[in-house]
Image (tube, grey):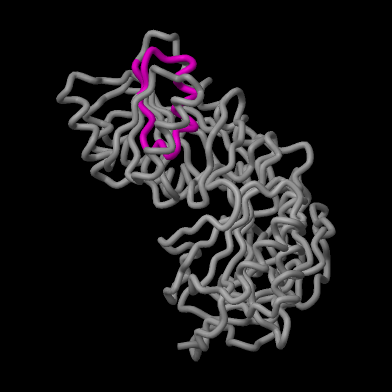
Amino acid sequence: MTGTLPVRRGQEVTLEITDLASNGEGVGRYQGFTVFVPGALPGERVKAGVISVQKSYARALVQEVLASAPGRALPACPVYPECGGCQLQHLSYQAQLSFKQQVVERALKYIGKLENVEVYPTLGMDRPWAYRNKAQFPLAQRGSRVVAGFFAPRSHRVVEIKECPLQHPRANQALKALLAAANELKIPAYDEATGSGFLRHLLVRVAVRTGELMLVLVSKDRDVPQLKRLVERLAAGVPGLTSLLLNVNPRQTNVILGEEWHILWGRPTISEYLGPFRFRISGGSFFQVNPAQTVKLYEKVIEYAALTGNETALDAYSGIGTIALFLAEKARYVHGIEAVESAVEDARLNAKENEIENAQFHLGEVEEVLPRLLAGGIRPKVVVVDPPRQGCRPEALAALAALAPERLVYVSCNPATLARDLGRLAGQGFKAVKAQPVDMFPQTYHVEVVCFLEKV
């Protein structure tokens, strides 16, 4: 295949980097052929080694930066860029914010085919480090030692770390405590290739405002050797530990969590505040990883929803009810729709514990529940959708169009699927007016977006 192409695997090339792709990789061209280069920035000239060649592009790794761009920054992490946990530490933070605004603009224009959508500058953080309240550390066996880190790009090889600058400091402390205990007790990590060993991941959740801490040990088997002594060491050695759980995942899969849960010590959940509301978080719950930026995100949702107190509102893909509770403060009544039963149970409990009486949560897919609400005479004027990364199914968009709300607020963590869905909604009577990127994930290429649409 590569016989007619200008590059081959293993070749060394010199490139002028002209752009950044949406995943943060530098873009250069060699004899007109596109080459993606992680760690390279626009305006730079780099020497790079080609590692893969496809029909329409190649990928290369930087060997030497011959001329640096003004936006280049010194990474804070000693194993960056070997570690695949983040992608933009080599780019100054202001440049990261500009890049993310551009990613949203391009997606709306080229994927959604949308013109005249005002995209505002990305809302950033004052200190874009140590912001993650949830860490998922893969574990690996290196000789006689259990180590932890993150997977190297495009592999399942664990790059060993001592601590991660993106994680809350208490998550890093908890990781050190687990590694010390597992190595002292000689509890082996799981080996994907052989199926031997036990410990697969450590999941840490930190509740910043309440101070509570949850640890989830993910094992291939319930019968972890020395488990009782491991629990004793963690309970005594991890300050503020509130919940210690065991998740059993025996499958050969990329999915981190299995379906079997056990309480090893403490409570089954922890609690955290977002704004004035207290939420109960279980081991498998979805909860935004950056609480400071989440409040900014939800404030923008409320601003775009423009509730007066007289409207019925709908929160589609409502999860554990976080957005719905914020809406309930301003709306007459709120209906939430969520397909995960445990999340619906959490949402109902969160509403009760926060004394929210004007919110109701429905179990099921959006495209199935919405017609039932309509048939029952419920027609919300304001709708908020916050789907997973893959966006909304066409059937869900059709159901939303049939509902015909006056205002629609779309929250997305994937500009590409956001743009695709906005393009489809444009053909069903909705106009995208403005979009606000929010930097929920500094040092990575990910960006959250709140978009306001109105019924034409």
Residue 406 found in image quarter: top left
Does the rendering let one see residue 61? yes
Residue at 43 percent across and 44 percent down: it is 419
Where is residue 452 shown, x and y percent of the image?
A: 45, 28
Total residue callouts = 0
Looking at the image, residue 203 sits to the left or right of residue 107; the answer is right
- Whether 103 is drawn above or below 63: the answer is above
**Is 319 covered by the magenta stretch?**
yes
Tell me: 194 left or right of 96: left
- Where does the N terminus fall, quadrant-wise? bottom left
Identity of the residue drawn at 26% across and 31% down: 401
Rendering quarter of residue 200:
bottom right
Quadrant where the image shows the C terminus: top left
**Does any portion of residue 32 appear in the rendered image?**
no
From the top left corner, tell me how far across and down residue 187 is, in percent: 65, 77
Q: Does residue 229 appear left or right of residue 415 in this picture?
A: right
- Magenta part of the protein: which range? 312-334
Q: Is 442 one of the magenta-colored residues?
A: no
In the image, is 227 to the left or to the right of 321?
right
In the rendered image, residue 372, in percent from the top left (x then y), is placed at: 18, 30
Picture layout, residue 39 above or below residue 50: above
Q: Quadrant of residue 123?
A: top right
Please name the residue shown 83% across and 71% down the image.
66
Residue extending farthest to the left is 375
Q: Is residue 422 above or below residue 314?
A: below
Identify the residue at horizontal 59%, vertical 76% (top origin).
225
